[in-house]
Amino acid sequence: MRFLLILTCSFLPTILSGQESTDDRWKRSGSPETYVHHIELRDARGQVISGTGETNQIPNMEATCAPCHDVQRASGGLHGGKGPDGPAGEPWFLVDSRSGTRWPFHSRLWPGLATVEELDLDQESLRKKQGPFDAGGHHSISGQASDCLICHLQGSYDFQQRSQFIKDGKSDLAPFVAAGLFDSAGLRSESRFDNQNRVVLDLHADAGPQACLHCHKVTPAEESAENPRWTHAGDVHLAAGMSCVDCHRAGLDHHVVRGKDGEIHPSGVSVEALSCRGCHLPQGDPVMLSAPRPEHRGLPPFHLEAMTCTACHSGATQGEEGLSVWTSRAHDLGIAKQGRKAGDPPGIFSGILLKDDQNRWAPHYQAWPEGWIQTSGENQEAEVIPPGDLRTPLRRTLRVRGDLLEKIASTDEDPARAERSLSAFLGQMKSPSALVTSGHAWERSPGDQLKPISSDLAGPVQWKLGHPVRPAAMSLGSNGCTDCHAPETPWPVLVSQPAPMIPMSAAGTISQTQHIDPESLDTFDSSLWNFWEWVFPTRDLAKVYFTATGALVLLASLRWFLKAMEGNRP
């Protein structure tokens, strides 16, 4: 068994990275060393683009890479929209200010998400909004071609320029502008071409963490004076000099390993050693990359069975669970803009403790849909109303031509204006409809107010949190059991607390949107948790008591034994 584990740890990187086509058409250096690319740029017809003279040719990524690489195979994988859906990941969000919609969606069939078809999103709008944070591929959400450079060009990729060109409808040219091969006017940078019409690109299989963080950055939305962002510790693996792809590996097919427990890779290769447990707690002696093997002294083993590694080693620090965060894809991180506010939609909350697909407690991100639904009727399920279908009704009823919430905002003189306006709007809808916000659907009630009703479409969506990973000295439990089990320890955050889109003043509404008592949830044994809260602070005292009692019993027994021995003497 030990021999097999050593073989797995030794050859897994080669197996995954070596899924190259054996077809002799493709060029291969045969060496793991970086190959400096001296290549010709080609247009969609495969014609070489000259470095001098006038030309209207637009470079094409697929045609440029195709002479040496199997671009058809490389355009799939996790980022390209192919492969199994697996456990839920971060969704995309449709944020539409004119209708107040902030709805999570994805092309993958993850729980609680709307589909592209349900939101009536066309390819052009997807490309402009989601395109900047989509690497592209034949099945990608944006529909744009693969951008090999955003992941593989090291150090000199201008993400801001790429984003702007995609939003301007020039997604084919965007990666070449970002790489400095064309200027901001879309003209060829002749100084980058040699006399053989070739350019030099420093391409790597691993271009470093920054290539991944373009699209996978997460940062606190709320600036804390006591704990500002610049004081936050980064991921322990990156601090140790590792790169994202040391764990999240892939072969030519780009089926990136997600690093989750129980993951089944599309290639059929075992990737257990690339998860937290497989790397640090393998069933045997060897570990990946000399990873430290934790001892977990004093930790009852059932914790490792009931919880993920990230429950203690990742996510929000204690006391900051449930705070809102910004993510690259939901909040356009990496793109310069003015007026960023902590409350910018969508609201995403961090450190929510939930059961994962392996039935273990794990920290999650959580978000709540907001928008409009057509409520269920006879033999009819509730459906999301696409923002495009709301344009005309909102304009006719509320005169909305810009931001809905700004248009109907309440004032000190008229605090119920927003609620009254939306109630009136619902009254003009042709079919029964409701507003979804703060975990409820709200329908019109007498007196131009809104009342909450239950709806499955109003429930939260969540996905597992993996980074940043903290070292043992900063993990939960590093100070002992009372990190979690003490009367003053905050209760685990089992559900986030979204604020309603507008102030709700209808009868019974306030109680619907107040703090949710975790003890009322059936997902956690509150009685056992409360018991441990009082037991653990007295554990040290109990140790002294039982040790002293044991010593007294031992002395009494010894005294009795000695007396018994004296009585037996002749």
Image (tube, rainbow, N blue to C red):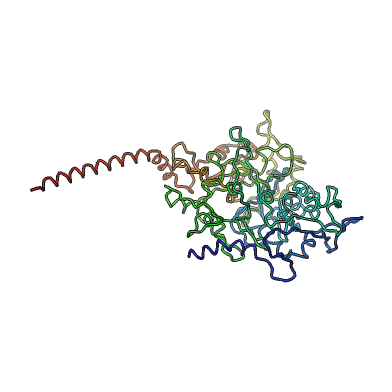
284 or 540, which lies in front? Answer: 284
Q: With 483 as the anchor, is 234 left or right in this view?
A: right
Q: Can you see residue 376?
A: no
How many numbered marks are there?
0
78 or 405, which lies in front? Answer: 78
Residue 145's place in the image compared with 566, above or below, is below
Q: Residue 143, located in which quarter of the rendered image?
A: bottom right
Q: Residue 15, located in which quarter of the rendered image?
A: bottom right
Q: Position of residue 321 (x, y in %)?
A: 55, 41
Q: Position of residue 441 (x, y in %)?
A: 61, 45
The furthest residue to the right: 54
Q: Position of residue 231 (x, y in %)?
A: 61, 37
Q: With 175 as the anchor, is 313 left or right in this view?
A: left
392 or 203, which lies in front? Answer: 203
Identity of the residue drawn at 69% across and 70% down: 22
Q: With 207 as the anchor, is 303 left or right in this view?
A: left
527 or 35, which lies in front? Answer: 35
Identity of the residue drawn at 55% across and 61% down: 9
Identity of the residue drawn at 51% across and 65% down: 4
Identity of the residue drawn at 75% across and 58% down: 36
Residue 115's place in the image compared with 427, above or below, is below
Q: Position of residue 35 (x, y in %)?
A: 73, 59
The furthest residue to the top: 413
Q: Can you see residue 3?
A: yes
